[in-house]
Image (cartoon, rainbow, N blue to C red):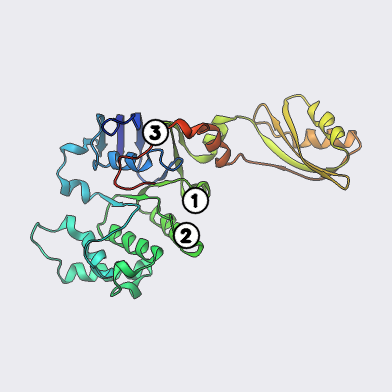
Amino acid sequence: MILEVQNGCFGYPKQPVILENINLRLEEGHILAILGPNGIGKTTLLKCMIGLLPWHSGKTLLYDKDIHTLKPKEVWSTISYIPQSHGFAFSYTGLEMVLLGRSAHLGMFQQPGKEELEMAEAMMERVGISHLANKDCNRMSGGELQMVLIARALINEPKLIILDEPTVGLDPAQVIEIRRLIRELGKSHTVILSSHILSEVQAVCSQVLILSKGHLVAVGAPEQLAEKLNPGSRLRATALGGGQTVLKAVGSIPGIRKVEIESEADGQVTFTAESADASDRRAEVSRALSQAGCTVLALAAENRTLEEVFLALTENESETPSDEGEEKTE
């Protein structure tokens, strides 16, 4: 168990509680997404999880030890954190920024030497950003800087990498590259990322944690969450025939609980049908349609999407607390 949160609660002074009764356990080797609407508390949760903000009650365990009992060097040689907003008071080149990632492994007054320099150059080459070695970080695009910060995180040789909204503000090509790199990181590291982008989570994550109204409302693999929320199976089909004929034929099948017409034009009807259990009812649907005089053009099982799970669990978010007390917003 690399990280565990036990009964975590947090709120900023004179504001409603943002996080309440947070419990989670993270095994090594997963890419975990913290998913929730903007302002719901994802950044606050990340900071509390890694000790940057103190829980009002509860605790975080890092390899079964209370994170606040560990020395900073023990924590930051294990964890690399890439925040969402990047502003630098001093001017660093790409290479200098990556070198900063070795700080947790050096003494207080120790300067990086030849070995650290070679490590930084090798890491930039691995990430594919050697051309940014001498470029001022304050002049980099959002995607370039994010790649530099990921290289800085990796040179720390961490067990756990934390990314807060890693693709916010990037163009489509940069988003694709960052997602590719995150998937690559997941092969050798444990990764936690926060996001409000459903497609991003579906594309890169093996586990999802959904945050709503200060609570964790669901944790698990995307497909497991979909099944838990609405167990059963669903299929999509297109047939030649009338809409009412389709509704009557498919709706009369035992175990079918819902039939919806999506479109009807030129004698073709496209519809979805949901069953009350996980049984595959494609054969039954095909047979019922044929008996009703309808010709089946397409018939396929369909998985529920993470978007459906997310919307069902986070509806009415207008009453939720926000991260107003934070240094940055989500």
- Inspect the image, locate mark 2, and give the three-letter code of the amino acid beneath it: Val
Residue corresponding to mark 1: 200
Residue 140 pos. (x, y %): 35, 68
Q: Residue at x 41, y 55 (%)?
A: 182
Q: Which mark is residue 321?
A: 3
Q: Secondary structure at mark 1?
A: helix
Task: Tell me if mark 1 has few (under 14), some (14-19) or many (20+) residues whose alpha carbon lies within 10 angstroms of its own.
Answer: some
Pick the front one: 326 or 31: 326
Q: Quadrant of residue 272?
A: top right
Residue 281 pos. (x, y %): 73, 33
Q: Residue at x 78, y 36 (%)?
A: 283
Q: Is residue 63 left or right of residue 114?
A: right
Are discs 1 and 2 less than 8 Å apart at CB?
Answer: yes
Cα distance between the residues tagged 3 and 2: 29 Å
Which circle's residue, 3 or 1, is located before the other in the chain?
1
Q: Which mark is residue 175?
A: 2
- Inspect the image, locate mark 3, and give the three-letter code of the amino acid beneath it: Pro
